Image (cartoon, coloured by chain):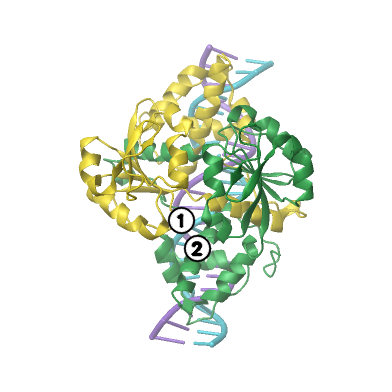
Chain colours: A green, B yellow, C purple, D cyan
Amino acid sequence: MISESSRRRISESTVRRLSLYYRILSVLEKENQATVSSKELARREKLTPAQVRKDLSFFGSFGTRGLGYPVCELKKRIGEILGLNRTWNIALIGVGNIGSALVGYKEFQRQGFHIKLIFDNDQRKIGSNHKGITVSDIKNLGKELRENNIEIVIVAVPATVAQYIVDDVVKAGIKAILNFAPINLKVPEDVFLRNENMSMELEYLSFARINLYNDLGTRIRSIQLFE
Amino acid sequence: MISESSRRRISESTVRRLSLYYRILSVLEKENQATVSSKELARREKLTPAQVRKDLSFFGSFGTRGLGYPVCELKKRIGEILGLNRTWNIALIGVGNIGSALVGYKEFQRQGFHIKLIFDNDQRKIGSNHKGITVSDIKNLGKELRENNIEIVIVAVPATVAQYIVDDVVKAGIKAILNFAPINLKVPEDVFLRNENMSMELEYLSFARINLYNDLGTRIRSIQLFE
DNA sequence: GAATGTGAAGGTTTTCACAGCA
DNA sequence: TGCTGTGAAAACCTTCACATTC
C-alpha cells in the first residue's frame, strides 16, 4: 500500500500533514476547484511548496507539470493512504465528559470513523442511549468487541482505571487504541497506541506566552507547524 | 525566563516532552520518590536517556551526577518553564459537545487552566449554568474578555463560524488561542494559535493499521513519540 | 510559461560517547 | 560506581534548485 516509491520510510510529520492536505482538498472539492498547485496548498497550511511536493512524492506522482494536482483524484489517493476510503468500526469506552462529546463528534463520522459500541462500568449509564447507541456493560467487552468486528478502540476513562481497561482491550485482540486518559499506558509492541493529550496544547500556549511573547526574535520555529 | 543557557532555541518537540516529564514527575511526587534518573524518565516515556538529559539541559543543570534529578525540584522548575505555577484565566467559546466536555475537564483545573467565562450564541444556552459558570452572550465578548483579564481563549464552535469568532477574539486583544474547530484559521503574526485536531490521531492510527500492520520492518520511527 | 518531481544541500534534532562529578 | 552534562557524530527532515514535462 506504500507503493511506487519502493519502501521509503514515511515520517510521522508527513502523515500528519497528509491529514491537513486531505482537509483542504475536501474544501476545494466542495468549491468545485479542479486543480490545485503545491504553492496554493502550502499557502493554506503555512508550509513551503517544496514540502508539499516532497510529502506527496513519497506516495507517487499525482500531479501534472505546469498545472498542479487534480483535486478530486488527489483527495481520493490521500484518503486511500490514510484509510479514509472505508468505514472503521470503533468502540468507545467511557461516556463521561469527553466520551459523550466524542459520540457526537461529526468529524469522525465524516471520515469513516464509525462509533458502533459504547461501554461504561456505571450501572446508571449502562442501557442508556447515546445518539442511538445503547451503552454496554464493560464486563462484556471482549465478547462484544469480537462479535462487532471492532478495529479501533477509543479509551476515555479516568486515568486511574485506564491501564486495566487497555489490558482487556489488548486481550480482546485490538491492535489500535486512541487514549484520552492523561496517563502513560503500556501495550505490547504490536499494538498501536496514540494519545490525545488535551492539556499539552494549552501548556504549549502557556509556555509561548511566557517565553516568547515579548521576544519574537527567538520565537520558536514552526510554532504553527501542524496547523 | 529562558534563562541560564543563554538563549538557545527551544524546539517544539522539547516543549512537548516537558509536558510529559511534568506529568510523570507529578506521579513520582505522589509516590514520594525523591530522585529520578534520566534512564527512568526515558523508560516511562519511551525516549532515550540522552534525549531527556539534553531536553533538561537547555534550561539549566538540575541533576546531580551519580544520583539523578530531585523529583520535587525538577517538577517545580518545569512547571515554571511551562507556566503551570500560576493560574491562567481562560474563556471558552461554544458549549456544544466538545465545549461542555472541556468545562468539566479536571486536568485543566489541576494545571492552573481556569475556565472563567463561557460564551455561546444560542439563546437557549445563554444564561444557563455549566459547572457553576453562567453562559454569556457572544455579543459581549470583547467587553467581558477585557473585564475578566482573560489571557487564553478556547474556541469550540462549528467550523463555519470559527473564523468570525477568532477575528473578534483577536480584536479583543487576546494573544493565545486554542482552536478545536477542524479548520485553518488566520490570525496576525503576534497571536499564538494552536489547533487540537482530534481526527488527526485517529487518521494516524488508521494509516498505521493499513500501512504498517504486517510490515513492522518499516514501522514508522517514534510512532509513540509524544505518548 | 507554469508547476511537478527529486537529488543534493542545508538545517535541525537525536543519539553517541565520554569527561566530570557525587 | 553511577549518572549527569555536553560537544561531536549520526540521523532525520526541510528547503533549494533545476531538469523535466505539460
Residue B152: % across, % down: 33, 40
Q: CA distance from mark 1 to mark 2?
A: 8 Å
What element does badge 1 sit on?
loop
Q: Amino acid at mark 1?
A: Pro
- The amino acid type, in three-letter code, at marker 2 is Arg
Position of A144 with respect to B42 (left or right) is right
Point out the image quarter for the C terminus of chain A: bottom left
> Camera-side residue: A70 or B152?
B152
Residue B37's quadrant in the figure? top right
Look at mark 1 in the image and give the residue it sits on: B182
Q: Position of residue B94 (x, y in %)?
A: 38, 47
* Dot 2: element: helix
Q: Counting other residues with Cα less than 10 Å from the Cα at mark 2, is it few (<14), some (14-19), or many (20 or more)?
A: some
Where residue B210 sits in the image (x, y, percent)?
A: 70, 58
Q: Chain of mark 1?
A: B
Residue under circle 2? A23
* Residue at screen point 30% across, 46% down: A217
